[in-house]
Every structure is written in C-alpha cells, then in structure tokens.
Amino acid sequence: MLFCVGPTRSKKTICVVEEAHNIMAIEKTRTYTGMYHVLGGSLSPLSGRGPDQLHIKSLIERLKGGAVEEIIIATNPTAEGEATAVYLSKLLKPLGVRVTRIGVGIPVGADLEVCRRSDHVKAMEGRREL
C-alpha cells in the first residue's frame, strides 16, 4: 500500500481499518503519519464473518518485531465495528501494545438537540481533559 511505504511514515503506530477505502478518510485529516492495517471487514456472526475471515493474524505478526507502540482501532461506529474494536482490544492488549479507539460522538457543528441518544452516550464516554 502506498501509504505505508513513504520514508516519513512512522512504524510505531498502526491504524486498523475495516476496508481499504477507509484509509482515505483518515488521510484527508493530514494528521496521521503512521502505518495502516486493513482487516477486510468487521466481525458479523449473522453474516458468517468471524475472526478467521478477517486479517487479524497478519496484524499480530506485524507486532512481533517490537517496533509498534500503538494500535489505533478505526473501525466504523456500527454494532459490528464496535464488536470488532472490543475483540481486537482484548486480543492485542496482552501483547504489550497500547490500544486506542478513534473518538466518536457529536459531530462538529451539530446542534445538541438534534443528535441521537447514541451520539450523546459516545460523546460522554469519549470525553477528555481540556
């Protein structure tokens, strides 16, 4: 993947996405300079997609060199994406790598009164120091 071969890309961080086209959304921010890992989907037992159907083993292989310090889980904020994020977190944390999740919640410029309850819940859960 072209984003992972540049000399300015940090090898200390891997951003995990569901599909290759998700990379462009992150690249548009122009704030992330690490590597990527494409899972090839998300966990979806109802669709018959379990851990063995995703590229999880190759992600674990990438951690073996010890150079990776952080895994950023950037799966979609859907039930499947959340389940995938929790699964990966439980799988990867024991390997000694920092596991973080992208923030979700109330979109910038949105009116609090028109946001969904789930947006408010995620915003409260993901709050940080100012």
Image (tube, rainbow, N blue to C red):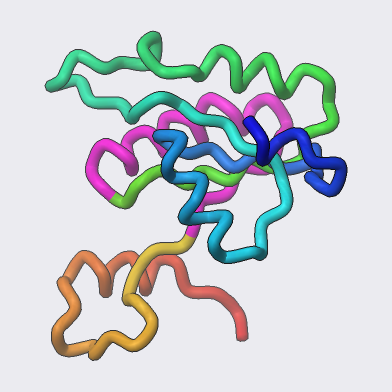
- Please give left or right for residue 96 compared with residue 106 in the image: right
Q: Is residue 33 magenta?
A: no
Residue at 30% across / 26% down in the picture? 43
Where in the figure is residue 61, as x and y percent of width and height? Answer: 68, 14
- Please give left or right for residue 120 compared with residue 58 in the image: left
Give the quarter of the figure containing the C terminus: bottom right
Occupied quadrant, residue 92: top right
Give the quarter of the figure containing the N terminus: top right
Q: Main secondary structure of the magenta part?
A: helix
Residue bounds of the magenta highlight = 78-102
- Please give left or right for residue 85 compared with residue 30 in the image: left
Occupied quadrant, residue 87: top left
Residue at 35% across / 28% down in the picture? 41
Where in the figure is residue 127, as x and y percent of width and height? Answer: 47, 74
Residue at 67% across / 40% down in the picture? 3
Image position of 62 with respect to 68: above or below: above
